[in-house]
Image (cartoon, helix red, strand yellow):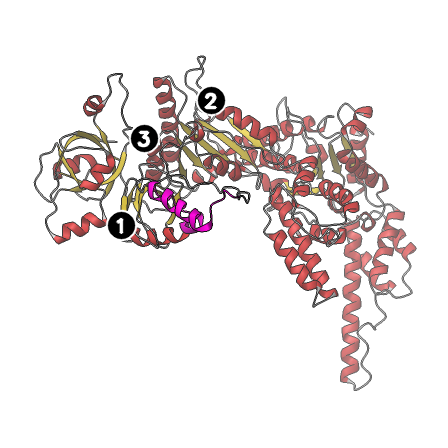
Amino acid sequence: MKTLEFRIRKLHVNSETERKLQKRQPSRIYVSEEALIELTGGKDGGKVVFIEKAATDKTADANRDGSFPHPMPRREATLWKAPEKLDKGVTQMYDAFRDASGYRLGEHVRITALGGTLPDAVDIVLEEITPGLTPAPAPAPAPAASATTPKPAEAAAQEDAAAAGAGQEPLRPAEIPGWEFFLCGRLSHVEHVYAGLTFRNLTLRGPERSFVVASVNGQPAGNARYLDWKTTVTIAKPAIAGEQVDAAAGQKLQLAGIRSLDAQVEKLNNLLRVFTTHSPVRPRGIPPAIVIHGGHGTGKTLLLNNIAKSGWGTVFRIQFKDKLADIQDAFQKARLHQPSIVLIDQLERLIDKDRNNRGAVVIALCEALDSLVEDAATKGEPPQVLVVISCQDYTTDIPEDLKEPRRLTSEIYLPLPDVDGRREILTSMGLGVDSDKEAALLRQLSERTHAYNGKDLRRLVDEAQLLGAIRHSKTDLHSEAQTGDTDVNANADADADAETPPAAAAAYYTAEDYEEALKLVRPSAMHDINLKPPPIHWSDIGGQDSVKTSLRRAVRLSTESAEVLSRYFKRAPKGFLLYGPPGCSKTMAAQAMATESGLNFFAVKGAELLNMYVGESERAVRRLFQRAREVAPSMIFFDEIDSIASQRHGFGQKPSSSGGHGGGINVLTTLLNEMDGFEALQGVIVLAATNRPQALDPALLRPGRFDELIYVSPPDEAARRAIFARVAAQRAMNPDVDVDALARDTDGYSGAEIQGICTAAGIAAYDRDVASRAASAGGGGDVVEEDGGGGIMMQDLESAIKTQKRQITREMVQGFEEWEKQFRRY
């Protein structure tokens, strides 16, 4: 930032054009063309600058004890080339702006170029400065009737006499909206509005009043463009002579508790206390920044907004779409407007990898944070610029350069609410059911809404109450529909963190309404995950009883209480590997497990995690496990896991096709660490399937990673009979179909091959039926019904068996059985 020193000289306004310009843009300051170029780098006027008294004049104004009789704030203004010839060290400004800034002719000021143009005014706050304002009298109690009580006429005379000697009362609340509208009209004639702009002796239904602009965009020395359609004008409480003001009121930087986030808010308050507490013991180089991270809807933006509302300092927000110059400008202004707060929501979007100048933005953030640390260390005071940043994942979203000491090292993780937190949030919303049923419903909903955040729970309650209103409207269109509309609107407008339940009819909604809402409202934490695997049930899988038993036990272990598990396990089994020949329902078993367990289901094919860019595959694996932890209880299913977990070559082994290269080794190492690393997999099941267990790295097969290795063999005769029987029940079968014979004839076939046989038989039966109906229609005879033709016949199935080749060889089965004998544990 370029800074020059100037001496103030009188600006003469002579022409009508100059007078109009003075009225519309009163915060203009003028310098010579040479000074303009040196400060801004060009001849174009209108750039934003800061102006403040030079150090020499500040000293002259100081009292004998070194204090100042009034504050010397920096002022925002716009810089222009002077209409008349000026020396390089001279500046001119309009009288009103000079008086509001506390400058005198001949004084020296420093002008610092900030760059950019004047921003739009989002909010303007005015204060009444009418001379002689006095506090409004409190309403006095009615006097008791007595002989000394004044008569009405006498009382009026006394009031008039008192009013004659008293000052003017401030605006009453009912008068403020009218005056705000009136002041909007006055401000519309001023293009550039600055803090300190004064409107005197205005009249609107009553005595004359005067007002001053107290702040622009929350800045006590701000300057911005007024826009009728965008700017909000507010009249604040006036500063009345003799009224005591709490000096510490604007210095408070502590947040109130938030439901289900008490521990996180307490940690945040401990960090914030450093910025306001003057302690004799203070480490050098306190980090000025705090990172708040967590999944969708965990409360990151809510905390940032609460910090902004604390009133501790001027707030500057950096948006993800801001240009590099805007980011640098925000930090520059924050340093000049101390105390101040810089808020960056969604940092991962600000430094997205698709951004062309991502590296430059990261460097700018590093330099800004380093400057803030140095400022505080030089002054020996607490940091007066607080930087609060939010992102989803501190580990992956924050570049390593920003994690260097004294930069973004203070971080707070916001988890999704647990069972108790969800119950507390739901209680605050009010379910509107019978009081004797509410406790049971709260317990049920809180246990079934894992992965739901506060917004999701709000949507759930709103949806249930909307369904209840619709149900009532169908019951009684004229009376209950009106009641339903009222209750729905009342609850729809309720805030998610309301402290008291809405006043709804106690028995208006039912548990069935919430049951239906659960089917419609899904957790946003799983917005990009397939929560609805194909609806496969255990009954759809013929045989495989041992597989079903093992997987059902796995589900029970994942949802069992820690107290029960501690009786039997130091660490309950979490990993389960399904292996066997292709087509033997390994994937179907995983889908059935997801369908019937109700766990959040993450299904990925191993090859989908591989990425050509270095580090991306490992990052995808870490992100997958992190998401699963956040929404536990959950299940991760790796199909074809051998594509990312093949054996590492070495000790005389040949390199494998997928695991022998460096990238494959890194992915495998990441997978091993996630499954059995320092961070426990609480409530997360890892299920994997492979046709090539021999190719897997031995480290993956040890207990603690894949605890149970489950062999999914080809279906035996009983399983094949069950498959054919289920197909027969679902399709049109001729009575001559012999399920037992089909089971005997398909020895060695996989379940997928048996399904293929049934499909081929169905095609043959369909073709025969089509030909029969066409012949009947062409011959003029009776048309055969669509379900005619005898359905699928035994001969269709027998022909299909003869054409379907077995892909599972005896050698293949023997290889799986030998591997099972070597590794099976249970």
The residue where tag 2 is placed is: 274
Rounded to the nearest whole Å, what is the CA distance between mark 3 and mark 2? 20 Å
Answer few, some or many: residues within 10 Å of disc 2's Cα (few below 14, many 20 plus, some between 14 and 19). some
Rounded to the nearest whole Å, what is the CA distance between mark 3 and mark 1? 24 Å
Rounded to the nearest whole Å, what is the CA distance between mark 2 and mark 1? 41 Å
Three-letter code for the amino acid on which mark 1 is drawn: Glu
- Image quadrant occupied by the N terminus: top left
Q: Which mark is residue 336?
A: 3
State the residue lying farthest toward the front: 147
- Residue 787, position in %: x, y? 82, 72
Along the polypeptide, which appears first: circle 3 or circle 1? 1
The answer to whether residue 585 is visible is: no
* SS type, badge 1: loop
- The stretch of residues the image draws in magenta is 147-176
Q: Is residue 68 found inside the magenta-colored segment of the image?
A: no
* SS type, badge 2: helix
- Residue 634, position in %: x, y? 69, 39
Label 2–label 1 contact, CB within 8 A: no
Nearer the observer, 38 or 366: 38
Residue located 22% across and 45% down the image: 26
State the residue lying farthest toward the top: 281
Answer few, some or many: residues within 10 Å of disc 3's Cα (few below 14, many 20 plus, some between 14 and 19). few
Residue located 82% across and 56% down the image: 801
- Residue 17, position in %: x, y? 14, 53
**Which marked residue is nearer to the observer: mark 3 or mark 1?**
1
The residue where tag 1 is placed is: 191
* SS type, badge 3: helix
The answer to whether residue 179 is visible is: yes
